[in-house]
Image: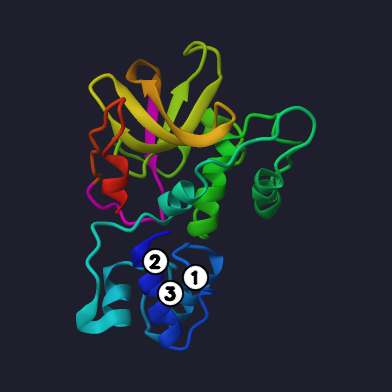
Amino acid sequence: MNDLTMRIQVRLIERGYEPGPADGIWGRRTIAAIRAFQTDQMLAVDGIAGPQTRARLFGSEAPLSPGHLPWMDEARRLMGTREVAGRGSNPVIEDWAARLGIPYRGDDIPWCGLFVAHCIGATLPDEVLPAHPLGARNWARFGSDCRPGLGSILVFWRESRASGKGHVGFYAGEDDTGLYVLGGNQSDAVNIKRLPRTQFLAARWPATAPADALRIVQMSLSGGGFETALA
C-alpha cells in the first residue's frame, strides 16, 4: 500500500471520479480515473500522476513526491507470492499472463519476465512490452537505457554470458559488489535477492514514465534502505 496513491484515490473520489477503493494500489481503475481527470483538465493524457496532474488535483495542497513509481508499488505489494510446488500452478501468476494475453502453461516455466511484465503492464498501460516478455534477456531492449537506480529494470545473465539464459527484476538497492533485485521466481517466490554485479547486463527505464533522477539505495546483507526509499 502506498500513502501517496491512497491520497490521490481519495481526492479523485472527492472530485467525482471512480478509481475503485482507496486501497493505495495503483491499478487499472486508478489509471483510468487519472486519464479521465486529465482529459477534463485538458492535460496530457498519460495516466501518470505527475507534478502537473497532482497540482490540478490538489491545488495548493499538492503532495510532494520525489518520483512516484507505481510499478514498484505493485511489485512490493506482491512480495511473498510463491509458485505452487509440484503439480498445479498459482492462479495469481497465471492471471498475470491471462490479463496480458501471454501464452503460459504454468508456473513451472520461469516467470521472472512475467512478473516484470505484469507490474509494468498493470500500472503503465501505454507502455510497449517486449514481444516475448517471458525471455529475461529480451528486457535488455525494453524502454530506454539508464543506469541502475530505484525502479529501473535490471537484466542479468545466468550460467554464463554466452548461455542466452538470464534473469530480470527491479532495482531495490546496491552495495559495493552486488545489486539487490525485487523480482519474481527468486527461490520460487517474489522477494528481494542480491545478485553479483559481475552478472549484470543492462538497466532499462519505462519509456512512458517520467525520467526523474534515479535514486541510489545503499543496502547491506542485513537489510535496510529499500523500505525507506519507497516511503
User: Which quadrant would the N terminus be assigned to in this image?
Assistant: bottom left
Cβ–Cβ under 8 Å for marks 2 and 3:
yes
> Does label 3 or label 1 sit earlier along the sequence?
3
Q: Secondary structure at mark 1?
A: helix
**As shown in the figure, which amino acid type bears the numbered disc 3?**
Gln
Magenta segment boundaries in residue numbering: 201-213
Cβ–Cβ under 8 Å for marks 3 and 1:
yes
At label 2, counting other C-alpha atoms closer than 10 Å, the crowd grade (few under 14, some 14-19, many 20 or more) is many
Residue 9: mark in rendering:
3
Q: Secondary structure at mark 3?
A: helix
Q: Cα distance, mark 3 to mark 1?
A: 7 Å
Whether residue 221 is situated above or below residue 25 in the rendered picture: above
Q: Cα distance, mark 2 to mark 3?
A: 6 Å
The residue beneath circle 2 is 5
Whether residue 128 is situated above or below residue 196 in the rendered picture: below
Cβ–Cβ under 8 Å for marks 1 and 2:
yes
Q: Secondary structure at mark 2?
A: helix
